Amino acid sequence: MNNFECPECGGGVAVGTAVLPGEILECPDCGVELEVISTHPLQLELAPEVAEDWGE
């Protein structure tokens, strides 16, 4: 388990060793969703917000 800094609040985010690119994690401090961008090196970014689909 590794600990990384949340890009939103600076809090600690625990990240397991088996994460995959595209996986969504949640910051335990501020609750923001983070997306794993790459695993070597591990890079986290704010996850894109899901737009509502109105059946189009």
Image (cartoon, grey):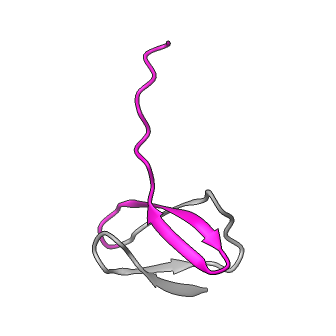
Residue at 57%, 65% in the rendered image: 36
Instruction: Identify the image quadrant of residue 46.
Output: bottom left
> On screen, 10 above or below 52?
below
Q: Position of residue 45 (x, y in %)?
A: 45, 65
Query: Which residue lies most toward the top here?
Result: 56
Q: Position of residue 47 (x, y in %)?
A: 45, 55
Residue at 33%, 80% in the rendered image: 11
- Is 49 inside the magenta-drawn segment? yes
Q: In the picture provided, is 43 more to the left or to the right than 8?
A: right
Residue at 67%, 79% in the rendered image: 40
Q: Position of residue 18 (x, y in %)?
A: 72, 74
Residue situated in front as seen by the camera: 1 or 51: 51
- Is 31 inside the magenta-drawn segment? yes
The quadrant of the rendering that contains the N terminus is bottom right
Q: Position of residue 14 (x, y in %)?
A: 51, 80
Query: Which residue lies most toward the right here?
Result: 18
Q: Which residues are magenta?
A: 29-56
> On screen, 40 above or below 2?
above
Residue situated in front as seen by the camera: 34 or 14: 34
Residue at 67%, 70% in the rendered image: 19
Residue situated in front as seen by the camera: 16 or 7: 7
Query: Which residue lies most toward the bottom here?
Result: 2
